[in-house]
Amino acid sequence: MADAAPDLNQGRLSEGPPLPGDGGMRRLIERTLRVDHAGEFGAVQIYRGQRAVFSSARGKERISALLEEMEAGEQHHLDTFDRLLAERGVRPTALSPLWRAAGYALGAGTALLGEKAAYACTAAVEDVIEEHYAAQAARLRGRDPALAALVEEFGKDETAHKDTALSEGAREMLGYGLFAAVIKAGCRAAIRISEKI
């Protein structure tokens, strides 16, 4: 018999007055949903930027198809967080226009540098998100098990994207170490900012 789907609407933030000690939990859930929504939104934009470059280039059908598949996974995550923001009464980040432009520019810019750079970008971004989701799942496990399970599941998807990028030669990009470090630093900064704004 199939397991029942977890009730991700438990802990709905818009119902009733807060209980003692509830403020910290509410803030944790709000930050979690806001930053994860922002991250998935940015990821979709990165893949869109990369696909815009590769889909119009001859001989780039394989990478275009891989990027399209990964973008579809990120879009599924984004749609889920869209729904959870609405259900739990949490506002999205105010920086969505910035993340749209920055994500698309990062995607298109890395694609213009070539396939290895596009894959290096994916590997770096997904490495940070994999760590981020693992830390979130650990914090949420005893507080909101359904959300913890969802974040853990999405983290596995991000790991698969990273593994795909690495298997496609991300580390073969000239200057990969520095390139990845810069992208990771940018991702970590975006995470900190999106949790709050």
Image (spheres, rainbow, N blue to C red):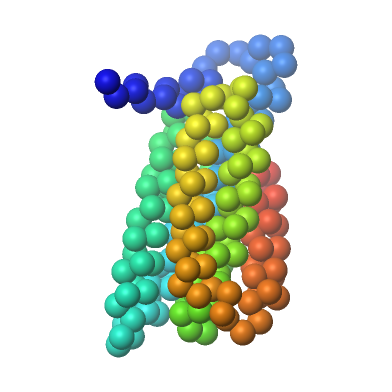
Q: Is residue 150 left or right of residue 144?
A: left
On the question of residue 104 being in view, the answer is no
Tally of numbered discs: 0
Position of the N terminus, as image quadrant, is top left
User: Which residue is located at x 51 percent, y 53 percent?
Assistant: 159
In this view of the protein, which residue sits in the foreground, 67 or 87?
Answer: 67
**Left or right: 182, with 118 as reference point:** right
As displayed, is residue 91 above or below residue 188?
A: above
Residue at position x 61%, y 22% from top? 143
**Does residue 29 show up?**
yes
Which is more toward the observer, 127 or 45?
Answer: 127
Q: Residue furthest front?
A: 167
Is residue 112 shown above or below 127? below
In x, y percent, where is residue 74? 42, 53
Q: Position of residue 129 (x, y in %)?
A: 58, 52
Identity of the residue drawn at 54% across and 25% down: 145
- Residue depicted at 34% across the width and 21% down the height: 4
Farthest bottom residue?
58
Q: Position of residue 16 (x, y in %)?
A: 55, 13
Q: Position of residue 56 (x, y in %)?
A: 31, 82
Locate residue 130 relative to residue 60 in the image: left or right.
right
Image position of 192 with respect to 82: above or below: below
64 sits to left or right of 161:
left
Q: Which image quadrant is residue 187 in?
A: bottom right
Q: Is residue 101 above or below residue 138?
A: below
